[in-house]
Amino acid sequence: MVRRARVIGCGSALPHRRMTNEELAGLVDTSDEWIVQRSGIRERRVAAEGETTSDLALAAARAALGRAGIAAADLDLIILATTTPDRTFPATAVRVQAALGMTGGAAFDVQAVCSGFVYALSIADAMIRQGQVRTALVIGAETFSRLLDWSDRSTCVLFGDGAGAVILQAGLSEAGAQGRGILSTHLHSDGRHEDKLYVDGGPSSTRTVGHVRMDGREVFKHAVTNLAAVADEALRANGLTAADLDWLVPHQANRRIIEATARKLDLPPEKIVLTVDRHANTAAASIPLALDDAVSDGRIREGDLVLIEAMGGGLTWGAALVRW
Ligand code: UT7
C-alpha cells in the first residue's frame, strides 16, 4: 500500500453576470461567428464591481468542503492558484483561510497563470505524500476580466471569471495505476517564451496592474505540442496509454487546441470535458471548474482515470494523472 492524495470533494463558483459574444461585438470589432469558430467560446461570466477573487474562491471552497463532508478545521493546507490576487500581498489564500475560520495550518498562493491549478495540485500532492499534511484545499480562482484591455479584440473576447476547488486527503492505496489518488504530476516551464503571453504591468516594473498581451498564434502552436507531450509523459510514467483514460480534463483556453491535443492522443471526443463554450478561459480556475462540472453531473466517477493538463503564460505547462 502507498500513501496518496485522493480527491474527496469538488466545488465551484461563477459570478452571476453572463457576457455573450453579441455583447462583446458591441464593444469591439468582432462577431459571435468569429469567436465561436476560432475559440469555441459562446459566453463567459464577469465579476461584479467589488466582487473579488477571494469571494469566488471562498464560495468554491465552501462547496467543496460540503461535498467532502468535512469542516474547515479539518484542513491543514490551502493552496490557491491565481493570477488576479485581491491584493499584491498578502496571498489571497490567507483571506480565504480567515473567512473559513481556519486558524491553523498554512495558506499560500501559487502563480503559474493558466497552469496554476496543476502546479498547486502538484505541490499539495507532494506535501501529502511526504506526510507533511493530511488534508489540503486546492483552489484555482480568477477575476481575469480585471486584466483585460476591453479595446483589444484579440484578447478581451477570450477570458472569463470563476473559481473551482478540490479537497485532497491522504489515504492508503494499492500501489500502481489501479490504486486511487493522484498517480503522478509533471510540471514544466520555459521562460524564453515570456513575451508570448504576459501582463504589461507589475509592482516592481510599472507599479501598475497592467493588461494581458498575447501572441495568440504562437501560444497556440506551443500549446498543442507541449500538451500532447506532457500527456504522453504522464501516461508513460504510469505504464498506461491514452486508451486507458476515462476522461481528459484540459485547461479550457480554446476548443481547437483541446481537440487537436485529443486527436494527437487518439482520444474520442466523448472522453473530453469541455466548458470553454460557457466559461471561456478562466486561467487557473478553468480545470477545477471543469472537474466540478463533470463530477456534479455524474460523468467522472470513483475509479475513473482522469488526465488533467494545462498550458499558459511563462510558458508553463503540466499534467496530473488521477485515479478518481
Ligand atoms: O490560456 C493560456 C493559453 N492561451 C491560449 O492557449 C490561446 C492560444 N491562441 C488561440 O487560442 C488563438 O490563437 C486565438 C483564438 C487567440 C486566435 O485564433 P487564430 O486562428 O490564431 O487567429 P489569428 O490570431 O491568426 O487571427 C486571425 C485574424 C487576424 O486578422 P488578419 O491579420 O488575418 O487580417 C486578427 O486580426 O483574426 C483577427 N482577429 C479577430 N477578428 C474578429 C483577432 N481577434 C479577433 C476578434 N474578432 N476578436
Image (spheres, rainbow, N blue to C red):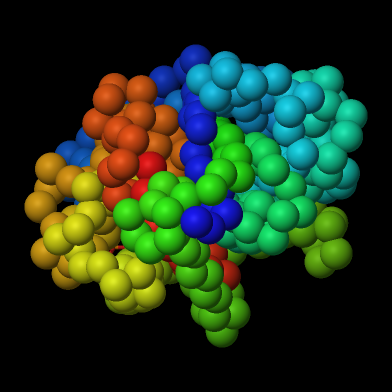
Relative placement, left or right, of 192 versus 98 is: left
* Image position of 290 (left or right of 239): right
Q: Residue at x 39, y 58 (%)?
A: 321
Q: Residue at x 45, y 27 (%)?
A: 45
Residue located 80% across and 62% down the image = 206
Q: Name the one closer to the observer, 255 or 29.
A: 255
Q: Tell me which residue sits at (77%, 39%) in the image.
A: 76
Task: Tell which of 145 and 101 is nearer to you.
Answer: 101
Where the C terminus falls, by quadrant?
Answer: top left
The quadrant in which residue 204 appears is bottom right
Answer with the quadrant where ligand 1 appears in the image: bottom left
Residue 53, percent from left and from top = 67, 32
Asked whether 183 or 35 is in front, the reply is 183
Above or below: residue 253 compared with residue 98: below
Q: Quadrant of residue 176?
A: bottom left
Classify 258 as above or below 291: below
Would you say 308 lies left or right of 53 here?
left
Q: Is residue 170 visible?
A: yes
Left/right placement of residue 97 relative to residue 110 reads right
Residue at the far bottom: name it: 192
How far across and how far down the image is residue 184, in percent?
A: 47, 63
Residue 283 can be seen, yes or no: no
Residue 280's spot in the image, x, y percent? 38, 39
